[in-house]
Image (cartoon, helix red, strand yellow):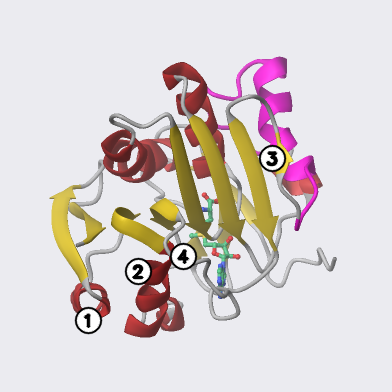
Amino acid sequence: MDLTPRYTLELKITGDGSHTLFIPELNEHYHSHYGAVTESLHVFIGAGYDHVKTGKNQINILEIGFGTGLNAYLTWLSAVKDNVQIRYFALEPHPLPVVICSDLHFPPYTDSKESKKTFLLLHESPWEEWTPLDDFFALLKIQQTIQQYVSAGGFFDLVYFDAFGPDVQPDMWTAEVFKKMFAALKPGGTLVTYSTKGQVKRNLKEAGFGIEKLPGPFGKREILRAIKQ
Ligand SMILES: C[S@@+](CC[C@H](N)C(=O)[O-])C[C@H]1O[C@@H](n2cnc3c(N)ncnc32)[C@H](O)[C@@H]1O
């Protein structure tokens, strides 16, 4: 597997004290510079996982853009607390080297030596095969683009759509891609994302989703939750 980063990756501290990575060539961060942990907890855990978990003891999640593994890690911690089993399937064409991930700090969730070790399991685990990391969390990381991905129809309860922004990577936010996400979800399934751009909303609707705007985390007015009706 080629782990040579395509771009320069700079470690940055966001507004809530957690790290993110910044790509100068794209002028783009992996997370909100107002707070990486705050954003992940609000958009993906709060509006996504917490919304979907009611009445379920197993949840299948698809993440578009595994990146630093922050969304996966916070989902894992939530699942242990809630006694819910997660099957977490993540697409990432450009996996981050473990040496970069070991410098990442997401307080308070990586404060202890033990928690940092747990976080790094996400990165050290093999690619392309289902790996149970404990009784609650099984991970499958696939080195593939969303464009290459052929969906297992109707398998997922929840999609974390965490691509780089639509201005930087417009080919991630097309109706064609969202149709793939729609097909991958079970009926009634949920997709959450941080972008509320007009074209993103129109493309989600064209793909068949019903959309709901929700208040955003600090520094962002609104976020989106889309439901496969
Ligand atoms: C905004 S970052 C978010 C990453 C991650 N969710 C996190 O919390 O660190 C976007 C991610 O999408 C990945 N990506 C880029 N092109 C992609 C593509 N065509 N298909 C799927 N993922 C892609 C990037 O490599 C990057 O890891």
Q: Is residue 54 left or right of residue 163?
A: left
210 left or right of 54? left
Mark 4 or mark 1: name the one nearer the start of the chain. 4
Select label 2 or label 3 by which is in front: 2
The span from disc 3 to disc 1 (Cα, nearest Å) is 35 Å
Task: Tell me if residue 199 comes above or below residue 119 in the rendering.
Answer: below
Q: Which residues are magenta?
A: 104-128
Residue 70 versus residue 30: which sits nearer the camera? Answer: 70
Disc marking residue 206: 1
The amino acid sitting under disc 2 is Phe
Real-space CA distance between mark 2 and mark 1, rounded to the nearest whole angstrom: 11 Å
Q: Earlier in the sequence, mark 3 or mark 1?
A: 3
Q: Earlier in the sequence, mark 2 or mark 3?
A: 3
Tag 2–tag 3 contact (CB < 8 Å): no
| Residue 194 shown left or right of residue 150 in the figure | left
Q: How far from the left and from the top, in percent, is residue 32?
A: 39, 51
Residue drawn at (66%, 71%) of the image: 144
**Amino acid type, residue under disc 4 in the picture:** Ala
The residue wearing badge 2 is 182
Near mark 4 (Cα within 10 A), the count class, few <14, some 14-19 or many ≥20, is many
Task: Determine whether the residue tagged by mark 4 lies in a helix, strand or loop.
Answer: loop
| Separation (CA) of disc 4 from disc 3 | 19 Å
Asked whether 109 or 201 is in front, the reply is 201
Disc 1 crowd, CA 10 A, few/some/many (<14, 14-19, 20+): some
Q: Nearer the viewer, mark 2 or mark 4?
A: 2
Name the residue rendered at 58%, 55% in the picture.
90
**Ligand 1 occupies quarter:** bottom right
The dot on residue 163 is 4
Query: Which badge, 4 or 3, is on the more N-terminal residue?
Result: 3
